[in-house]
Image (tube, rainbow, N blue to C red):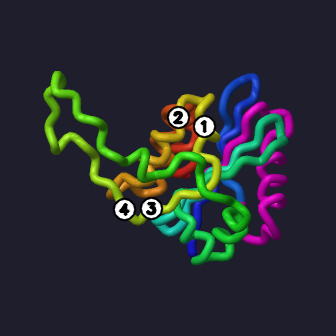
């Protein structure tokens, strides 16, 4: 499986993005060490790992500590060594994806069009901490919706999340390099 791993770290002077190699990583702590090495003094460090236009994993460190992990689909852990390495010990998110994707309760005072709802992938099975970006402006339900939206590639999700948190240009420049 091919992958793209982009670290986005926020320090006092703004966001920095760099590519990170996971080729010989031994375990998720080894990956976390590589993320710490990007900028050991960063207050927030994120790693976006996209694999084969199918899977996305986001890792987060605050002040170099307390590793948090979210994956778009647990199937990634079953299909690749990197997926197993990143998601092997991760549980289900606190918010069930079905609850996020359930149609809203109809309000007879609001005129809605049935086509307004985004198409969703029923078989998305996210794992981990869907709340890991809440304080950066991406609530858990939004992250889960992005992962379940039909036609969204991991790179699309990464781009949207990075734009929302303020490092979109840095990660896009890295992708284009």
Disc 4: which residue: 122
Disc 1: which residue: 133
Asked if residue 110 lies in the magenta stretch, the reply is no
Disc 2: which residue: 138
Asked if residue 31 lies in the magenta stretch, the reply is yes
Q: CA distance from mark 3 to mark 4?
A: 6 Å
Task: Determine whether, in the image, residue 148 is placed left or right of residue 41.
Answer: left
Task: Determine whether, in the image, residue 101 is placed left or right of residue 113.
Answer: right
Task: Report x, y in % for residue 113.
Answer: 14, 37
User: Which segment is the magenta one?
Assistant: 21-48
Disc 3: which residue: 124
Q: CA distance from mark 4 to mark 1?
A: 23 Å
- For the N terminus, the image quarter is bottom right
Front tag of 4 and 2? 4
| Secondary-structure class at tag 2 | loop
Residue 22, relative to residue 128: is it above or below?
below
């Amino acid at each position: 499986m091919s992958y793209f791993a982009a670290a986005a770290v926020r320090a006092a002077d703004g966001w920095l993005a760099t590519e990170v190699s996971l080729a010989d990583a031994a375990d998720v702590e080894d990956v976390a060490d590589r993320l710490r090495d990007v900028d050991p003094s960063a207050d927030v460090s994120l790693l976006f790992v996209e694999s084969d236009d199918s899977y996305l994993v986001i890792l987060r460190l605050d002040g170099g500590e307390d590793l948090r992990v979210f994956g778009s689909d647990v199937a990634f852990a079953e299909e690749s060594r990197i997926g197993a390495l990143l998601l092997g010990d991760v549980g289900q998110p606190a918010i069930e994806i079905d609850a996020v994707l359930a149609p809203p309760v109809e309000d007879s005072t609001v005129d809605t069009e049935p086509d307004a709802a985004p198409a969703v992938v029923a078989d998305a099975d996210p794992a981990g901490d869907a709340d890991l970006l809440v304080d950066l402006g991406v609530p858990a339900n939004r992250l889960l919706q992005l992962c379940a939206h039909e036609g969204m590639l991991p790179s699309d999700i990464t781009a949207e999340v990075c734009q929302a948190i303020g490092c979109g240009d840095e990660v896009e420049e890295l992708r284009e390099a």
